[in-house]
Amino acid sequence: MNLILLSKDDFIDPGRRVRLTGRRHKHIREILKSSIGDELCVGLLGDRIGKGRVLAIDDKAVEMEISLETDPPRPVPITLVLALPRPIVLKRVLSHVTALGIKKIILIQTERVEKSYWNSPALKEESIRTQLMLGLEQAKDTIMPEVLCRTKFKPFAEDELPSLIRGTRAFLADPEAEEAAPCGNATPATLVIGTEGGFLPNEAALLKRAGCESVRFGKRILRVETAVIAAIARLAP
């Protein structure tokens, strides 16, 4: 936890003093081993980043005086469209891409996605929020990403994707593509990644018809969490 994330509900003196319990208190007390007078990196969710000076700490809570001084890091201008991976993989992907600065994630159904995945606890709002928070804490960021779910592939590809990618350069990840993905893409991008088995030919055709360019990020078949990170790192300006 490189950043202690705060919410407005934490404040006991508006804008100045917070009281933390639970996971954050435990981390400050047992991992950071902070004591009165120590300064920690804090950030207000959806707002700025600064310092929190410990005023009081015991086995129940920690109180800090807060000073917020700097803006959060700039987001990476990439929208991620991802075929829903296995639940355990989804958790890792959400925290990793959040740490990388992605602010819009769209999870989609494809023929190779097990429909049972959509019923997983990993897709519950609280579970998703937990993973996003972990990513923000890792990267010292305060702006929560938006996560959308689309359980019908064809309506998404035909009706929503064309407007979604407008004003961006849209890339469909395909290890068999002739063209290599650009490095450090200078314009906003939409990145579309399938399962480890890729998209079916008819699905890829719909994505290309919507305006996606088929590009390769290398010829190796990677695990989803590896492919997502490698592709974002290559495209990020």
Image: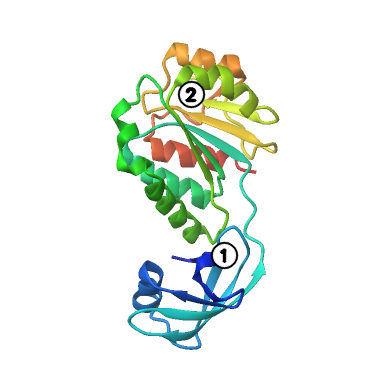
Q: Nearer the viewer, residue 163 or 178?
A: 163
Mark 1 or mark 2, which has the lower sequence index?
A: 1
The residue under the point 60% across, 78% down is: 16
Q: Which mark is residue 174?
A: 2
Under circle 2, the secondary element is: loop
The quadrant in which the C terminus is found is top right
- Judge whether 128 appears above or below 86 on screen: below
The residue under the point 46% across, 16% down is: 203
The image quadrant of residue 71 is bottom right
The residue under the point 42% across, 82% down is: 34
- Amino acid type shown at disc 2: Asp
Q: Which mark is residue 44?
A: 1
Q: Nearer the viewer, residue 170 or 129?
A: 129
Q: Nearer the viewer, residue 91 or 198?
A: 91
Under circle 1, the secondary element is: strand
Residue 8 is situated, as x and y percent measured from the top left of the image, at: 55, 66
Residue 234 is situated, as x and y percent measured from the top left of the image, at: 56, 39
Q: Is residue 173 left or right of residue 213?
A: left
